[in-house]
Structures are given as structure tokens and as C-alpha cells.
Image: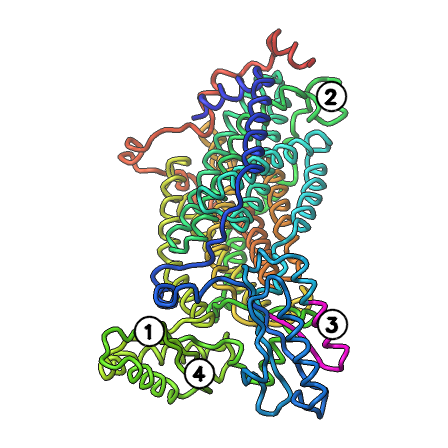
Amino acid sequence: MATFLYRVGRLAFRRRWYVALVWAAVLAAVGLGALKAPSAADEGFSMPGIESQKAFDLMEQRFPGATADGATARVVFVAPNGQKVTAADHRKAVEDTVAGLADGSQVASAVNPFQAKAVSKDGTTAYATVTYKVAADDLTDASKEQLEHALEEARDTGLTVDAGGSAMADGGGAGGTAELIGVAIAAVVLLVTFGSLAAAGLPLLTALIGVGVSMATILALSDALGLSTTTGTLAMMLGLAVGIDYALFVVSRYREERARGRAPQEATALAVGTAGSAVVFAGLTVVIALAGLAVVGIPMLTKMGLAAAGAVVVAVLIALTLVPAFLGFWPNAVLRRKDRRRGRTEEEAKDNGGTRWARFVLRRPLPVLILGVVGLGALALPMTSLQLGMPGDEAKPTSTTERRAYDALAEGFGPGFNGPLTVVVDAKGADDAQAAAAAISKDIGATKGIVSVSPARFNEAGDTAVFSVVPSTAPTDEKTKDLVTTIRGERPGIESETGATYEVTGTTALNIDISEKVQSALVPYLIVVVGLAIVLLLVVFRSLLVPLKAALGFLLSVLASLGAVVVVFQEGHGAGLLGVETTGPIMSLMPIFLVGIVFGLAMDYEVFLLSRMREAYVHGETSHQAVTSGFRHSARVVVAAALIMIAVFAGFIGESDSMIKMIGFGLASAVLLDAFVVRMAIVPAVLALLGDRAWWLPTWLDRILPRVDVEGEALTRGADSPEPAPAEQEAARV
């Protein structure tokens, strides 16, 4: 591996113009394809195998066109204190508003609340449902402005008017602000780390090129592969983060080789052969973690994982080819200013912050290990009370109209009104479909915790009925989850009596099913991802204990970060500092996201740090000396890489959407804990306690494992001379 990559780096340096032109052509080609590609149809969110999804599929089959994904807006009218919305003047204002909303070119219908009996019992609150002909993403600015204008006119009459629903969505996402913050902080970190504008700018430039290639490819293939714009969100975030990190490690190793007196071409080749080997295997661990998201069984999540894995592959290829090509264009520019005239940098000091920290841990490994494990364990404890769900409008800030509309409906109609259950009755096997549906409706309505049941609506064939059930508790309440379980548990008895079957669906039931499926998929996902990564690390480090230690350390950090998420977003401690106004269940996909993304990034740091220790160990240093050498060469770069990751993820905490805040906080805290507690403290402590046993491998296993030479032993044997060749001297002057 190292020899092959050495040749790749040498070729990229020598043929730098060809390499640069090839990448420019690739970027132009996929960019042109992205511009010409038709927009992919939004397939929506689906999760095969769960009851809610089966019910949705049955409704689409039995009620053709009835489940079209048109945008909706629920406009809520609340009368002033002591008054009723049914009063003549307020009623006229409501009816005028609804009539105005119905005139929109994209509006399919606007239902008058007084005709639909959508008025609260106390007469203070009413709501009108506006249905559009197109999906939320296809609403024009004119339609949105018409809705906003209608709300403002209604407010002028003295009513409190707010609206929720998919028509109010603003497209979500981080909008690029978080990425800009992350890039800005990354630039500062790189500048401090390298002391050179060129050295700081090169990783940023190559990472942006890699992200451009990845995102343009996703857009170009969006229609053919059924990808959407949301699919690329994870790809952009990870592509940017790992792209900077991988280039950072290659450039850092290049400067190190220059410090040893290597000529630019030889230094580049050695950097790609050694650091590049670590980049390849680190990238493979990330790809494994992302591709493993397919285990969960959510098509959208699978596509996001594969798209992000593709972005990581591009980042690896950029680091192995374009980075050495750029080093060929500017071989001395990445050195510190004081070293450029000499054409080389000074030899790295024997003692630096990394070596001092390593010696501190080596002198007292047991206390450091105990403190690190106990601290992470304490942070992980709140994870035992983790509640999963899909927060909706109730989790938005009170400054938003969606949140105010949610609260008004809950106050006027009850907390369960915002999350009704939908029951789909399949009466094909019943003698009397209407009698069967009525019996099922009556039995479900008698269940404790049900407030109301709507009249059943039949399809044209008369063999399928649908009715809504309003619970007495909020959508994210644990009692609502128990209620859904109870209704489904009563099904066998009801089916035997009526001859008809039914399924429970709706947004609330769907979220409950998703949470349960994600929880059940988490353990298999961990087994697949961690198992494959252990095998990969076994090949890389030729050790039994090092891969096991890496996996256990990751589990500690990810559990601790999940505990931190629970403390802030579920229990509310410190939530105000992050601008979180409402606490509740943790987003269902959060554990999977955290495990998948952080595992890949954690293995990045493990590979980069341990590869330098392994390199020193196989070259004759003792186990303790190898730990010190590894920290001397890698600690500063690993810290810089971690700070960049934390900056990229922490930028999302400033967003208004609570779920984006949660993702940003969870990922940033996980990287912080894994990089600085696990990799920089627990890892050297464990290696100090194990000594030579850390690198032990059974003889029989050593014989069957392939040798990849990630340490570059074959390279260092043939590259001991520091004197540059004449051709390389000429290259240095370029």
C-alpha cells in the first residue's frame, strides 16, 4: 500500500499540470451535468416494514389520489380575552379570510371552520384548513405571500391569527451559514497550526473542490438515482470536514519530511506513501460507517449515507492526487516564511506540547484512565432515560407562527388534537363492510385515552374505511405511545368478531413506529459497523488489542455524547444557553446519525495517531517511546483536525431549528469527547499499561492477514538520504 501510494504521490508531483487539468475537467463535467439534470421528484419519507407505512400504502391503493402530497396550512383564529370567535364581527372576519385564501391560483380548497364544525367547545378558537394543489416545495412566492397577507389582514380585525402545516415550511436546513462559520474557524485553526497562509489555504481549497465535485455529482445523478437536495446535506457536511482533515495530514507529513532534508518531490511522495496510507484506511472506516446506514432500512437514510460515503471517497482521492499536485506547484509556499529562503523547514523539536502531554500520561496512566472512563460514564448515565420521537411544531421557538398555532389548537381543542391517529379499516373479508367499520370505530372509541372518533369515510368500492381518532394526550407524550400499543393490541379480538382488519397510522403513529424501528436497528448497526472496522484496524495495526480498545473507546464517547444531548434537549439543563425553548423527546434518527458519523471520524483520529505510534514501534522504539513519538508528530495535527470538526458541527447550534441544533450539539460534543478524552488521554493510558502486549498478534493470525505496510517501512529503507536529486532541486525552484 505505502509503496503504491508513494508512486502515486511522486507521479502527481511530476505530472501536476495533468492532475490539475483532470480534476478541473471532472469538476466542469459534473457541474455541467448538474445544471442540465432535471430536478428529482421528492419521493417523501418512507420506512418499509412498519405498520404505519403499510397503512399509508393501503390508503394509496384503495383511495387513488386521496393521499396526494399537496401542501396544507392550518390557520388558527383565537378571539380576544372574554370574547368568542362565533360573534358576528369575528365570524365575518374569519369567513372573509377563508374566502380570500380560497382565491389563490395554487389553492385546491379552503374549508370554512363554521361549516366544518372546526370550532372549540368554548367558542374561543376556530381553525380553517387550506389545501394546495402542489407540494410544499413547489409553492410559489406569490402563494406564500398571499397566505401571509391574509393572516396580517385577519390580525388587523383584533383576532389572534397563526398558521401551521407544511405550507409554512421555509425549506429548512442550515442555509450555508453554519458551513461558512465552520470554514472561517477552520482557516484560523489551520493558520495557527501551520503558521503559513498557503499551508492553511491548501487544505481549504482542496476540500472545497472535493465538495464541489461531490455535490455536483449528486445533483447530476439526482433524477436517475432518486436523490433529493436533502440527500446531499450530510455529504456536504462530512465532505468538507474530512476533506480538510485529510489534506491537513498530508501537508503536515510533507513539512515533516522537508524538515528531514528531503527534496520537495521525495517529501511529497513519502507524505502520500505514509500519511496517505492512513488517509485511505481512515476513509474506509468512514465509508463503512456511512454505507452501514443501509442496515436501518430507511431508504432516505440509506441514500444519505451512500451519498456521504461517495463524498468521503472523493476527499480521499483529492488528498492522494490533487494535494501532491498543488505541492508540486508551490513546494516552498507551505513552509513558514522564515524557512522559505532555505527551501526547507527546521527539524521538528524533540519536545513539544504533544510529547509533554504523552509523558504526563505515561507517568500516571491508571489515574488518567480511571478519570477518563468515570467521567465519560457519568456523562453517559442520562442516556438510560433516552426517549425517542420526532419533534414537530411544539419544538419550535414561540416566536414562530407554527408554534403559536400549535399551542392555540392544544389549548382550544386539547393536547391530542395536534396528533390525531388515522385508522384504516380493510373490510374486504367482512360480510358487511359498513357494520364492521362501525363496530371497530365503536370499540376503539371506548378505549381509555380517546377523546373523539370521526365518522368513517369509505372508498368507492366500499371495502375500505378511514377515520380519525383524537387522543387525550400530546403527540410526543409517552401515554400516546401506550395508547397506540393498546389499540393495536385489541386488534385480534376485534378482527375475529367483525371479519375486518385495521391498521393505525398518521404522523403520530408513524413517529412512534420509526422510533421503535430505529431502536431495534441500532444494535445490529453497531455490530456490523464496529465489526467491520475492527477487522480493518486489525489489518492496519496487526494487533488484537488496539482495534478492541478503539471500538470500546468509541462506544464510551458516543454514549457520553448521547447523555449530554439528553441532559440539554430532553431534561432542559442549560437549554436556555443554546436557545432551546422547548424540551422533549430526542429525534429518532439522532442515535443512528451520531453512531454512524462519529464512529467514522473517531476512527480517523485513531488511525492517524496510532499509525505514527505503530511506525515508531516497528522501527525499533520501545512501546513507551512509540507513544511519545506518535504524540510528538501527530498530537498537534489531531487537535487541529478535531477543532475543525467541532467548529463545523458547532456552527449548526446557532440555527433556529431545534433538530438542527440537536444534531450540531450532539456531533460537536461527540468529537470533543472522543478526540480529547478518548484518543488523547484514554488511548495513551491504555497503551502505557499494556506495553508491548498492545502490539501482540498470534502467529497464526499474523500469517493469514494481508500486509499493507501502512507504516511505510519499505519506503524508509530506501529513502534515507536527505540530499535532493538535481531534478528535485529544479522542482524546488518552481
Residue sitting at 44 percent across and 71 percent down? 506
The residue positioned 69% from the left and 89% from the top of the image is 88
Residue at which label 4 appears:
454
Q: Is residue 609 visible?
A: no
Q: Nearer the viewer, mark 2 or mark 1?
A: 1
Compared to residue 537, the image places residue 411 above or below, namely below
**Is residue 109 visible to the viewer in this orientation of the structure?**
yes
Picture coordinates of residue 266 (x, y %)? 57, 17
Residue type marked 4: Ser
Pointer 1: what residue? 464
The amino acid marked with disc number 3 is: Glu
C-alpha separation, residue under disc 4 versus residue under disc 2: 79 Å
Q: Tag 2 or tag 4, which sits nearer the N-term?
A: 2
Image marks 4 and 2: residues in contact by CB distance under 8 Å? no
**Dot 2 and dot 1 residues touching (CB under 8 Å):** no
Residue 2 horizontal side relative to residue 295, left or right? right
Q: Position of residue 300 (x, y in %)?
A: 45, 53
Question: Viewed as shown, does residue 420 lie left or right of 344?
Answer: left
Magenta-highlighted residues:
148-164
Label 1 sits on what residue type?
Answer: Thr
Q: For the residue carrying disc 2, how many other residues have a C-alpha within 10 Å: few (<14), some (14-19), or many (20+)?
A: some
* Vertical position of residue 435 compared to residue 15: above or below: below
Q: Which residue is mark 2?
A: 340
Numbered badge on residue 98: none
* Residue 152, disc: 3
Q: CA distance from mark 3 to mark 1?
A: 41 Å
Return the disc, 2 or 1, that comes first in the chain's sequence.
2
